[in-house]
Image: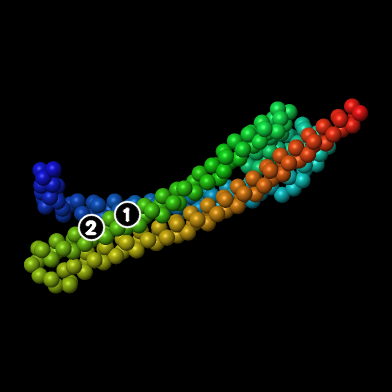
Amino acid sequence: MSGFELSLAELFQRHGAVLLPVVTAISAAGIVLCSVVVLAIVIERSLALRRRRILPTGFLEQVRRYWYRGDLQAALECCDEQHAAIARILRAGLVRHQAGLHEVERAMEAAGQFEASQLSSNVRGLGVVANLAPMLGFLGTVTGMIKAFNAIAAAGSSNPGLVAGGISEALLTTAAGLLVGIPSLALFHFFRGRVERFVSEMEGIALEFVEDLLSQQQRARRQEQADAL
């Protein structure tokens, strides 16, 4: 272990003048890359999480109308025409309605879990950037402070002018990392809240569908009992 520590120390002593600028450049490039990733995710999620792509207006009323009329094929075609999350969930239940209520619930639950995962897929990237960008900024801070202390050691003096450049670089990289990380964290919570609201609404709609199916089954049983009498 001591041999490794010695070799690492020697490495910095011999090549520190080259390594520190490289590490600083990596830190700055990483922060720039994080900002580009955040911008791409925000644009993509803003388009993907539009209400009409998840819960289109008028779709539910149309499906209910076909379902109450007993026109299953028309209800399925209506779901196929809509490229929306709720349409795929309801279609999974409609396809299996003859298999019983339990199978309908299982199919819709599986479809709902898949759609919820799809809605939150890229949102997790914002959380990663929110944690990564400040760390990259702190990396630049460390290299800047090392430069500052090296300047003091080389000059054998504590003249503030010798360390001003290193401290300025350290503060700039820290600020840049936080400027990317803080908005990323805010956007992460914003989009996650939006996803949770959509998932909650879809769960409510799926529950209403299951309750309607249960009511229809109960009415059908009562009718059969009445006919038998």
Q: Earlier in the sequence, mark 1 or mark 2?
A: 1
Q: Residue at position x 71%, y 39% from top?
A: 210
For residue 136, which numbered disc appears in the image?
1
View extreme (front): residue: 229
Q: Is residue 89 left or right of residue 5?
A: right
SS at circle 1: helix
Q: Who is closer to the viewer here, 110 or 75?
A: 110
Q: Amino acid at mark 2?
A: Thr
Q: Is residue 188 left or right of residue 229?
A: left
Find residue 98 and report its horizontal and vertical position in percent: 73, 28
Name the element at disc 2: helix
Residue 125 visible? The answer is yes
Left-right relation of 165 to 222 = left
Q: Residue 121, how many percent across, how many down?
A: 50, 44
Mark 2 and mark 1 in contact (Cβ < 8 Å)? no
Q: Disc 2 designates what residue?
A: 143
* Residue 121, label in figure: none
Counting from the top left corner in percent of width and height, residue 2 is at 11, 45
| Label 1, residues with CA under 10 Å away: few <14, some 14-19, many ≥20 | many
Residue 216 picture quarter: top right
Q: Amino acid at mark 1?
A: Leu
